[in-house]
Amino acid sequence: MSRTVFGSLARIADLATGGYAVSALAMDQWRSGDYVEAVVTGEPSELYKIEDPEGIMIPVAAGDCVVGALGDRAATLEGVGSWTAVKNGNMACLTNAGLLGQFTCLSTLLPRPISLWYSGHLLRGGNKIRMSDFALSGCPGTFSTPTVLLVGTSMSAGKTLTGRKVTEWLVRLGKRVIGAKLTGAGRYRDILSFRDGGATEIYDFVDVGLPSTVVPEETFRQAIRPLLQHIDSRSPDFLVAEAGASPLEPYNGDAAVEELNGHVKCTILCASDPYAVVGLQTAFKLTPDFVSGPATTTSAARDLVMKLTGVPAYNILQPDSLAAFEQALTTHLFGDHEPKPLPQK
């Protein structure tokens, strides 16, 4: 029996309870951020799962309906696609969050993604339902929260794990932390990791109506400013912010760094290998405070990072290295006023 599964891009909306109609629209009426319904087709593969609004992966099969949002993706390791590439109603899940469009380039290392058939747009009162209808609005003002920024040399470079470790450490020190993912392609699991690490609140670009941040720079800035203003209004001690992918990819990572308004107290680069650290330093003119991720897996790798760049590298999965990482964070964030951890409960 077929069913309707809502992707996690629908988590900001009231679609499951508020009701809607479904009607097919001509493509000249389609826009990024529109909520649409599509029917699952094809034989299931390992990727035939949808991340629901709670972050739970739900298996789907032919005949099931998926509710997601139109958008774009430009992933270096997996696939590139866009809602503008949809032809004759044939669609695909660009991510399991329900980012819908069609792939224009797909890694041969991936299983076959979910194939779909466009049913129609979600409507209320004859009007399209869009992510922006449910977007968070920020308070007037500027952003001034002390921030630990995580950037990467590519996707899957260890940013989310490192961010969780930083969050856990700050929480142990009694600090109130907000976790945020400022750029990327709409998976909820990443910021849920910050919540699991003890962040009191979590946010991402979905909260301000973007299905992904592969959008024009001005569109991104207009959306992300209310998010940062809202975070600032919550008065956290620290923001742990992840810029998904790398600053040089078309996700507006460079604009995200600029919008943090000079309040980054520590920048951690998560790198795939030591030479990637050099590449990002050269191309983006960014010298991080520390390096983490796969580039730090062995002592030889960490030594090479130091030799090539002069930047300390820490493998946060090794207790001794993690302890050194936390001590270095203490120096950068607190200087001579070293805080004491809270007593263990």
Image: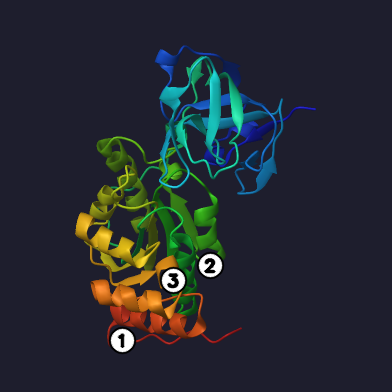
- x then y, percent, for residue 18: 61, 29
Q: Which residue is mark 3?
A: 166
**Marks 2 and 1, Cα distance to the nearest angstrom?**
24 Å
Which of the marked residues, 3 or 1, is nearer the chain's N terminus? 3
- x then y, percent, for residue 269: 34, 65
Colour approach in the figure:
rainbow
Which of the marked residues, 2 or 3, is nearer the chain's N terminus? 3
**Marks 2 and 3, Cα distance to the nearest angstrom?**
8 Å
Q: Tell me if mark 2 has few (under 14), some (14-19) or many (20+) residues whose alpha carbon lies within 10 angstroms of its own.
A: many
- x then y, percent, for residue 324: 40, 84
Whether residue 293 is visible, yes or no, is: no
The amino acid at mark 3 is: Val
Q: Quadrant of the N terminus?
A: top right
Image position of 42 (left or right of 31): right
Q: Secondary structure at mark 3?
A: helix
Q: Which residue is mark 2?
A: 197
Q: Secondary structure at mark 2?
A: loop
Q: Which residue is mark 1?
A: 337
Image position of 131 (left or right of 5): left
Q: Secondary structure at mark 1?
A: loop
Which of the marked residues, 2 or 1, is nearer the chain's N terminus? 2
As drawn, the label of residue 104 is: none
Above or below, 97 relative to 143: above
241 or 14, which lies in front?
241
Going 65% across and 38% down the picture, which residue do you hit? 48
The amino acid at mark 2 is: Gly
Above or below, 106 relative to 174: above
- x then y, percent, for residue 309: 24, 72
**Marks 3 and 1, Cα distance to the nearest angstrom?**
18 Å
The amino acid at mark 1 is: His
